[in-house]
């Protein structure tokens, strides 16, 4: 991956992360929790969502390690479940909101891109491939393609049932009281568990599982234009 590709990938990654976090805060707000709104986190201003580890260190570490994939996360939106009528059900809805938003964005971008790419001249794929209009078109579809890919990755990654990821909140809703207490206890170690999973290559099975989804969404024509 070239430096240009890395820079464009980061540009595509940020909106996917921000939409994910804002979705959490918005659903919490609709359920009666004003915490995220009061702290100014229901905003699409990227500065408000930057997390030192997830937004800067982990992506840079993956680049240095020449990882075949790039991902990260934003500073979690603050949620206070005490405002919810049913704290565990409220947290279930808040947790699902992030991955569901990522899936919706991936599908919506796929529809727009699939329609738009039909208007791209065939010459941009072959004879005129290195002209300025073709290069601009390639950059646009690369950004859109990476946006689709990152949204799919974030949706599945966040459903891993390890605190503080959304999957742990979903799992907690279905656990008996003893299991919920164990999950709350585990949360204080969740970041270190997650970091160990990442560094030890534990995410490879996940990415192998979802590897074909972006390709199926984008299609051969889009993939050829954006990634060749």
Image: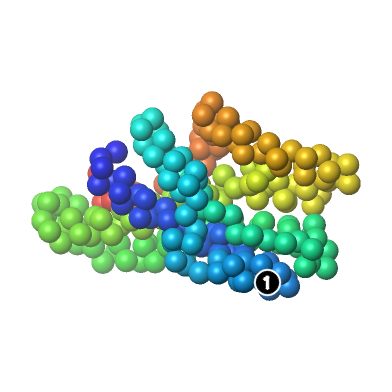
Residue lying farthest to the front in this orientation: 39
Looking at the image, residue 221 sits to the left or right of residue 59; the answer is: left
Considering depth in this image, is 144 or 179 the residue closer to the camera? 179
Percent of width and height locating residue 67: 40, 33
Percent of width and height locating residue 12: 38, 55
- Is residue 4 depicted above or below 84 in this figure? above
Residue shown at the point (44%, 61%) measured from the top left: 46
- Is residue 100 depicted above or below 189 in this figure? below
Residue shown at the point (46%, 40%) measured from the top left: 58
Q: Quadrant of residue 191?
A: top right
Looking at the image, residue 111 sits to the left or right of residue 34; the answer is: left
Looking at the image, residue 188 sits to the left or right of residue 88; the answer is: left
Looking at the image, residue 137 sits to the left or right of residue 222; the answer is: left
Residue that badge 1 annotates? 34
Residue shown at the point (59%, 67%) measured from the top left: 39
- Name the image quarter holding the N terminus: top left
Percent of width and height locating residue 188: 70, 40
Residue shown at the point (20%, 59%) measured from the top left: 136
Percent of width and height locating residue 190: 66, 39
Considering depth in this image, is 173 or 47 the residue closer to the camera? 47
How many marks the image carries: the answer is: 1
- Name the image quarter holding the C terminus: top left
Residue 154 visible in the snapshot: yes
Dot 1 surroundings within 10 Å: few (below 14), some, or many (20 or more)?
some
Q: Secondary structure at mark 1?
A: loop
Residue 214 visible in the snapshot: no
Residue lying farthest to the right in this orientation: 177
């Amino acid at each position: 991956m070239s430096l240009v590709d890395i820079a464009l990938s980061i540009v595509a990654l940020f909106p996917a992360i921000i939409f994910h976090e804002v979705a959490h805060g918005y659903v919490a707000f609709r359920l009666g929790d004003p915490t995220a709104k009061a702290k100014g986190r229901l905003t699409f201003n990227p500065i408000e969502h930057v997390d030192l580890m997830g937004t800067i260190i982990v992506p840079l570490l993956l680049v240095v390690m020449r990882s075949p994939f790039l991902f990260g996360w934003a500073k979690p939106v603050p949620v206070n479940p005490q405002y919810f009528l049913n704290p565990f059900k409220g947290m279930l809805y808040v947790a699902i909101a992030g991955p569901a938003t990522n899936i919706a964005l991936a599908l919506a971008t796929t529809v727009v891109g699939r329609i738009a790419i039909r208007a791209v001249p065939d010459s941009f794929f072959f004879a005129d491939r290195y002209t300025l209009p073709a290069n601009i078109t390639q950059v646009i579809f690369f950004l859109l393609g990476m946006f689709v890919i990152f949204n799919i990755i974030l949706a599945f990654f966040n459903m891993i049932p390890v605190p503080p990821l959304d999957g742990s909140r979903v799992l907690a809703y279905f656990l008996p009281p003893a299991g919920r207490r164990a999950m709350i206890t585990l949360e204080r170690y969740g970041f270190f568990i997650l970091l160990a999973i990442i560094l030890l290559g534990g995410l490879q099975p996940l990415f192998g599982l979802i590897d074909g989804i972006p390709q199926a969404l984008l299609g051969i024509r889009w993939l050829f234009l954006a990634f060749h």
